[in-house]
Amino acid sequence: MLCFSIGPGVGERTGTEKDTFVNIKAIGEFVVNVVPASLGNQMHVTAENVEETIDEFKRAGVTPVESRSVRAKRVKEAPIQMECRLEQMISLGSDWLIIGRVTHYHIQEDVYLGDYKVDLDRLSPLGRLAGNYSEVGEIFTLPR
């Protein structure tokens, strides 16, 4: 299982539901692509508000690939892709907690260390935090 939250539309979209939420609610399936910092600009393009008829893969310059267990497409360039079926949507104030059951997990060999571990230095994952972005900083083990 994995989970993430989706808030309401903001700015020009105030009072609306974000496309990601609408799509998950409609088909009950989705893909979570783990994006490296090198794809940050492309990821940002996919977060912009565009008409439904616009191909966001093409607009962002990334390659769509068929999934194995869900209808949603994956981003070929993303080193990790998780195909999910919606397990539960929980309303939390104005936000929604989306819980998905992972049905298929894809990982590129160059970021897989074996034994269920990911090479975070090589992956260089980019996070999106309420419209802002974050890169993984120093990685260390405890105790120090």
Image (spheres, rainbow, N blue to C red):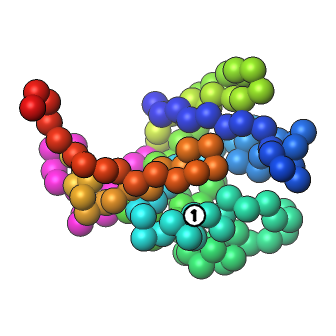
Question: Which residue is the site of mark 1?
Answer: 43
Residue in the image at 54% along x and 61% along y = 74
Whether residue 110 is situated above or below residue 143 in the rendered picture:
below
Residue in the image at 80% along x and 44% along y = 9
**How far across and down, in percent of the image, does residue 90 sit?**
67, 21
Viewer-nearest residue: 117 or 36: 36
Q: Can see residue 28?
A: no
**How far across and down, in percent of the image, does residue 132 sit?**
58, 51
Q: Which residues are magenta?
A: 104-116
* Quadrant of the rendered image containing residue 141: top left
**How far across and down, in percent of the image, does residue 38 sit?**
42, 70
Q: Is residue 88 magenta?
A: no
Residue 131 left/right relative to 142: right
**How far across and down, in percent of the image, does residue 92 sit?**
70, 20
Q: Is residue 109 magenta?
A: yes
* Amino acid, disc 1: Met
Whether residue 80 is situated above or below residue 24 in the rendered picture:
below
Q: Can see residue 71?
A: yes
Q: Secondary structure at mark 1?
A: helix
